[in-house]
Amino acid sequence: MSIEIINPFPSLNVDNLVIRAIQKADVARVVRYFQVNRTFLTPWEPLRPDGFFTYEGWERRVIQLTELQRHGLAYYFLIFEQGSEEIAGVITYNNIMQFPFHACNVGYSLAEASQGKGLMRRSLKVTNQWLFDNLNLHRIMASYMPRNTRSEAVLLEAGFVKEGEAKDYLLINGQWEDHILTSVINPHWVASINE
């Protein structure tokens, strides 16, 4: 089965937020986001090589991400507050699979300066809905470390339901970390007649 991608570079709006898929012109913004928030994000992310924080590293990565978006295999959304060119956060959808799974994984991060405003909860809801509506996904899965109470609150408010626990699930900041597994289900999913 093939999914026709309506727009590989969607731009979505909710309240005072603009959430749009990454494009080549975003390289410098993304580098700045990760450089400015490097220390803040370190406890919650995999160890990053130095190239992850450079223009050259992200130039190559954005080429790969835009190709994955063109084919509906992954999406890398940037969150902006209206009127600002500074990235407030990112949402990544990867491992997008169609029949018979119709599911993907989502991950996200939010700038230190953007904490406590409800940006991620609102952004996650609108991007999840876009994937449900445009890719006909049935399930979106997310996980969080038990001590990450902010991430837990974001996911619960965005409609995710706890499904279990996984021991030593992801290598975060150089250590294997347990994670709580969650998902949100598309209540309007309908099987395609082409399956």
Image: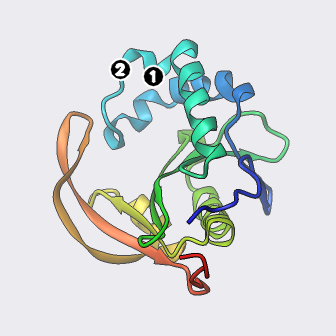
- Choose top left, top right, bottom left or bottom right for residue 45: top left
Q: Is residue 157 above or below residue 120?
A: below
3D distance between C-alphas at marks 2 and 1: 6 Å
Q: What's the residue type where badge 1 is placed?
A: Phe
Residue at (48% x, 20% y) in the render: 53
Whether residue 33 is visible here, answered yes or no, is: no
> Closest to the observer: 138 or 157?
138
Asked which colour scheme the image uses, the reply is: rainbow
The residue that label 2 is drawn on is: 49
Residue 98 as seen in the image, left or right of residue 182: right
Q: Are marks 2 and 1 in contact (CB under 8 Å)?
A: yes
Q: Is residue 44 above or below residue 16?
A: above
Residue 167 as seen in the image, left or right of residue 138: left
Residue at (21% x, 68% y) in the render: 165
Mark number, residue 52:
1
Mark number, residue 61:
none
